[in-house]
Image (cartoon, helix red, strand yellow):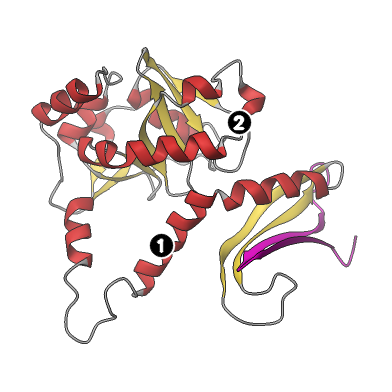
Amino acid sequence: MKIEDVKVVGKPLAVATAADVDALASRLWITFPAGYREYVTRLGEGVLGGSFVRIYPPWRIEKELPEWRRRISKYWFWDECRELLPKERALECVIIGDTVNGDELVFHPSRPNRLFVLPRDSEQVFDAGDDLLTAIEWMCTSGEVVEPFRERNFEPFDSRIEAEGREKKVAGADPEGESLDDIVELVERWAKRHAVKELARKELRGQTPKGGKAELLYEGILIDGPSKMDVGYGVAWRIIDKESGKLLGTFRWGKGDGHEGSEFEPAKNG
């Protein structure tokens, strides 16, 4: 991918300066991967390719890196790829971006010319390339984390302004922290902090029929209604036969106040 191929949709850009990049590199004692400086100083913060890839500007890396390392330390589940990226090395990595699906793009300070993707829905670590633009192209076209797509539009946003905006609710609006957007963001943070999807995935592996492939159906909060999962957080996968594509059933996992549980419901035609 080339920066020149990216079409900016919307203005203004929220770009970083070269000084911003150098200052953070100095504070963290790191060298950023090739292409990072060009990307954040020309495009800045935003969403690329069908609202999919988000590369972090320096201010977001600095803000989120400590919490990200704590979460990875507590909920690491990519042990099947230990030879590619062992946990002890991953804990030293720097997160440089993510996708709207929750896949994360990282690199180790000792090898900035090698980027890795930690997929949210797989235990396999992926080697995404030796520079940022190559890694972005891999995420958009490899088919490993999303169906391949050609769109390279870029929609800017500035997380610093959005954070300030959330603190300035207009009269008649929802109370601070209680809008639907706020609640969704809160739930996403809670789910990441407790790694509930990773816990659900472990149960999923034990209940997936042989030859079955799991496809995410939904993830969210259950407020009311008849359900074996009771109220609280819930996530579900459709289980598909790999060869025939036939629906085998649905696996659901839920966690509420002091309880958690799972169930596999076979398809009626199974």
Q: Is residue 190 above or below residue 80?
A: below
**Which dot marks residue 186?**
1
Number of other residues with Cα within 10 Å of mark 1, as a class: few under 14, some 14 to 19, many 20 or more: some
Q: Position of residue 165 (x, y in %)?
A: 18, 65
User: Which amino acid does the dot numbered 1 rest on?
Assistant: Leu
- The quarter of the picture where residue 55 lies is top left
Check if residue 260 falls in the magenta segment.
Answer: yes
Check if residue 44 falls in the magenta segment.
Answer: no
Residue occupying image coordinates x 55% and y 48%? 195
**Principal secondary structure, stretch drawn in magenta:** strand
For the residue labelled by badge 2, is the local secondary structure a helix, a strand or a loop? Answer: loop
Observer-nearest of 7 and 54: 54
**Which dot marks residue 78?**
2
68 sits to left or right of 145: left
Number of other residues with Cα within 10 Å of mark 2, as a class: few under 14, some 14 to 19, many 20 or more: some
Q: Position of residue 14 (x, y in %)?
A: 15, 45
Residue occupying image coordinates x 39% and y 49%? 50
- The quarter of the picture where residue 4 lies is top left
Q: Position of residue 7 (x, y in %)?
A: 25, 42
Image quadrant holding the N terminus, namely: top left
Which of pointers 2 and 1 lies earlier in the amino acid sequence?
Answer: 2
Residue segment shown in magenta: 242-270
Residue occupying image coordinates x 19% and y 54%? 10
